[in-house]
Amino acid sequence: MAEIIQRDGTWAFDGNTVRITPGLHRSVPLFRQTYGEIAVPLEAVASVVYEPERKRGRLRLRLREGADPLLQATGGRLPDAADPYRLTVDLDRSGIAEYVAEEIRRALLLDQIPKEPAKEYLLPGPPVPVSVRSSDGTVSFDGAQVRIDWSDTSDRVKRATGPRIIEVPDLVQVEWLPNSGYEDGFLRFVTRETAFSKLPPEKDPFAVDLWGSARRDLLTALVATAVTARLPHPSTRTGEYLAADAPRLPLTTRDAVPSEPQPENHDVLLRRLRELGELHREGVLTDEEFAATKAAVLRGF
């Protein structure tokens, strides 16, 4: 067993798995503490390096492309302190860090782990259900559907559409950009119907606008990762993207045989449309906002 214990966390390698446990110190980011322990199978590792610095060193684990839904969802945009695959090492523990890195490298060589992209996720991502309250609302995922409940401060267009529910089979991908504290971020759920939507995140009823606490909004990456882990792997999505990018057929052709709405859904749809009509007549929604919101409601049903 090769193990190093630091204030930021613990790395332990038993020959098959690198077990990464976040530290309990208050300096450890909330995202790391919430994400919890990560068990990285050796087959998911591309390389490991120890980088000595002037005051402290750093252990860095690099995973194979496509092996981890967290890296797929965040696209390298996690702040360094929140990255679970980096460990800050005190100078007096540099020898232990070098030993841990060397043990992992030796195992990679002996097991002849390939470095090319993985064809399936080798890590499971966070468990579900998962729910995060952000500046724009609460986004939840139970493994089958995403639900967004808007906050009182959300844009009126979003609040007018009511809670947004998105089924996993309808999703094409998840887009995530963190709130940096200087620029807003967003968590957007792209469906086949909204793939070409140009609405900004603050008005898009399929996107959570991240403009509040950067520390707390970072937790939306948990939802992004959990959903990404349950979408088709990127290596298998070529056909889906071609279908999503294909020109839309005219309404009269595409919907020549419309499906029959369920009675309860039909009642909800009519009620939503009536509410939107009232908001439009009262001047709460502009013509453009009314048209965009109505289209979003119809797509949701």
Image (cartoon, helix red, strand yellow):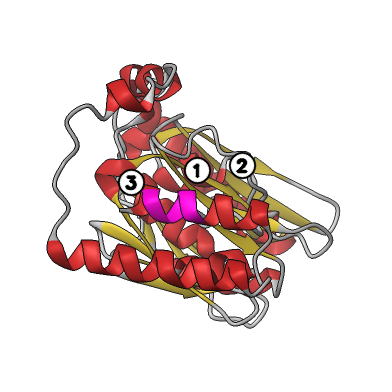
Residue 6 position within the rendered picture, expressed as x and y whole percent measured from the top left: 58, 68
Identify the amino acid type marked 1.
Answer: Leu
User: For the view shown, which residue lies furthest in the front direction?
Assistant: 281
Q: Label 1, label 2: how many angstroms apart (C-alpha)?
A: 6 Å
Q: In the rendered structure, which disc, 1 or 3, sits on the residue that comes first in sequence?
A: 1
- Residue range of the region highlighted in magenta in the rendering: 294-298
Identify the amino acid type marked 2.
Answer: Gly
Q: In the rendered structure, which disc, 2 or 3, sits on the residue that comes first in sequence?
A: 2
Q: Label 2, label 3: how many angstroms apart (C-alpha)?
A: 16 Å
Q: Is residue 55 magenta?
A: no
Vertical order, 36 against 111 (above or below)? below
Q: Residue at x 60, y 69 (%)?
A: 281
**Front-most of 40 and 97?**
40
Q: Which residue is mark 2?
A: 76
Q: Label 1, label 3: how many angstroms apart (C-alpha)?
A: 11 Å
Q: Residue at x 29, y 69 (%)?
A: 268
Q: In the rendered structure, which disc, 1 or 2, sits on the residue that comes first in sequence?
A: 1
Q: Given this view, does label 2 or label 3 mark the residue nearer the observer?
A: 3
Q: Which residue is mark 3?
A: 229
Determine whether label 1 and label 2 are within 8 Å by CB. Answer: yes
Q: Which residue is mark 1?
A: 71
Determine the image quadrant of residue 271.
bottom left
Q: Residue at x 47, y 48 (%)?
A: 295
Q: Residue at x 63, y 39 (%)?
A: 198
Position of residue 220 in the picture relative to residue 40 (left or right): right
Q: Is residue 221 visible?
A: yes
Q: Is residue 112 visible?
A: no
**Front-most of 61 and 6?**
61
